[in-house]
Image (tube, helix red, strand yellow):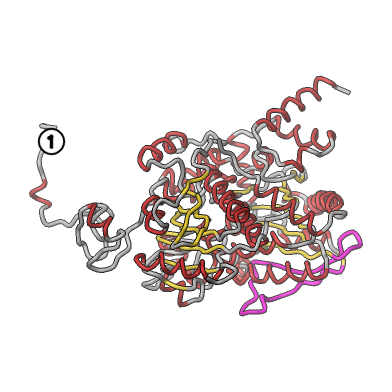
Amino acid sequence: MATDHELRLRERLARLRSLNLLGGTRVSGELEKLQRQLERLQAAPTDEEIWRSVELARHQDRPYTLDYVNRLFDDWVELHGDRGRADDHAVVIGLGRFEGRTVALVGNQKGRDIKERTERNFGMAYPEGYRKAMRLMELADRHRFPLFSLIDIPGAYPGVAAEQHGQGGMIARSQALLARLGVPIIACVIGEGGSGGAIATALADRVLMQENAIYTVISPEGCAAILWRDAGEAKKAAAAFKPDAVHCLELGVIDGIVPEPEGGAQTNHDEAARLLGDGLREALEELESATPDDLKRRRRAKFRSLGVYA
Amino acid sequence: MSSRIDVSIEHRNVPEPPGKQHPNTCPECLSHYRDDELEAALWVCPHCGHHFTMRARARIASLTDEGTFVEEAADLRSEDPLDFFDLRPYTERLAEAEMKTGLGEAMVIGQGVIDGNPCELAVMDFAFMGGSMGSVVGEKFSRACDGAAQRGVPLVSVTASGGARMQEGILSLMQLPKTVCAVEDLHDSGQPLISVMTHPTTAGVLASFASLGDVIVAEPGALLAFTGPRVVQQTTREKLPDDFGLAEQNLRFGHIDAIVPRPELRSYVARLLRLFSSNGD
């Protein structure tokens, strides 16, 4: 055993602990797992690497929710509609068999060609999309199905009708419902984790992120437009707010990084799906024995511990 | 300075550019007031009824019974986890905001009594970095929920915020689920959240605790939108209705319970607190 190496890792961990950045659940992990994650932390990404993540997260050939569903689930049945007024095609919900058990899945869905992109509204959900997701969350809770949430959204749709139908309130209520569920919830950011539109379905027991995914409070372009008064400064903005997986892990915002095939998930969808499946299975196994009350309590405690202040 | 050529005479009839108005000039009817006049009128224009933004301390004084408010967690301060630097360092912006407002952060929390009804208050101040929600606002709101639950009293929140604080990056987004979880814990303890939305309550705050009030009331003319009109217009090129995102539109579409003018707010909230108290007296 390379004690030198272990020492370095432990030092790193001690530093993180003293910053009060890591939630309790994460620190209690086994050393081996910790080692794997911490090796990534040791090489903090450069500004160039951060921007490469932004580009890869938005790559047009990157696998979307349905690409993964088809590879990971047997007997996938897609469900439709919010039972109120619409079926938002930017959000996919359904039931499938994962490793021999029924799982409920909600995911953001972008389109590949112009026709599908328009139909999916470029992956940007309306309030109806979140109500559709909430309908599935309730179903999952009722029948004790674990819930998977795949996140890949530039942001909740910013339109007149979306506002009139209560975009902000719906995002709040979707989170509140997730905070009440008694089943395991595993979320993974598989592309763009865009602000409120993403967090609406990301209040989970385990939040994972693919290696080249990004998780942001505002798009790099939006941040640049506001703080630099120039959307062209997106690269600078991204370097400043650090939306990459490694930094998110370091800040305690996510619980683990799911590796991608060499060069990015777009190069090999099958391999990307296999790696994502491994991550989801591992997280599910950790959560399966917990009681509904424990899940709820720990989930809330985890999110309530997030933040840095003096 | 002497080398400057005075060109003001050429511009005599050019109106002041919008947004350059004096803070005491009403943007609706252009009436101008002295500080003490506005203060006496609770920062509501006596001529046209326009609601100016109200500072957190003044808000607390206007809502609570005199001498009852006890502030909590006043010493919490933001850190700079990302070493964030845009045109200026985040730490500098924080220091300047504190100097300007006399507040440690964009939210003040504490115990108070409204017309005889004990409650917990969480009041935002737009003057502190646009009322943006970072780690400290999230933590303060979270503690206000716990304080209310422990003392068995309702929580009254008054929001005024542009949204999440970009300078804290992803951690500011995490204040959405954090405050949502805090409200859920408050609800589990059996206590209500009365949410008062004032101008503006937008983006991250609207998409988290503010929208989870058991009762939601708004001030007249307040902008309550997830995405503001300028961005919606730019992104979608849609023609915006005149009252886009305003409290009045939100009431019509069923997102809030009532629009209450500021002078009536205290008695309105007091009535709600009485109805939520177990014995109803």
Placement of the N terminus of chain A among the 4 image quadrants: top right
Is residue B108 visible to us here?
yes
Placement of the C terminus of chain A among the 4 image quadrants: top right
Tag 1: amino acid: Arg
- Look at the numbered disc 1 and give the secondary structure of its residue: loop
A310 is higher (above) or lower (below) than A68: above
Tell me if B54 is positioned left or right of A222 in this view: left
Other residues around mark 1 within 10 Å, as few (<14) / some (14–19) / many (≥20): few
A141 is higher (above) or lower (below) than B185: below
Residue A36 lies, in percent from the top left, at 80, 35
Residue A132 lies, in percent from the top left, at 67, 71
The residue that mark 1 highlights is B4
Nearest the camera: A141 or B276? B276
B240 is higher (above) or lower (below) than B124: below
Identified at 76% across, 57% down, the residue is: A185
Residue sticking out furthest to the left: B9
Residue A104 picture quarter: bottom right
Residue A271 lies, in percent from the top left, at 82, 50
Tell whether position A78 is magenta.
yes
Q: How many marks?
A: 1
Tell me if A173 is positioned left or right of A181 in this view: left
A143 is higher (above) or lower (below) than B23: below
Q: Where are the magenta residues, as a range?
A: A75-102
Is residue B235 visible to us here?
no
Identified at 66% across, 60% down, the residue is: B189
Tell me if A261 is positioned left or right of B43 in this view: right
Identified at 61% across, 33% down, the residue is: A46
Tell whether position A92 is magenta.
yes
What chain letter is assigned to the residue under label 1? B
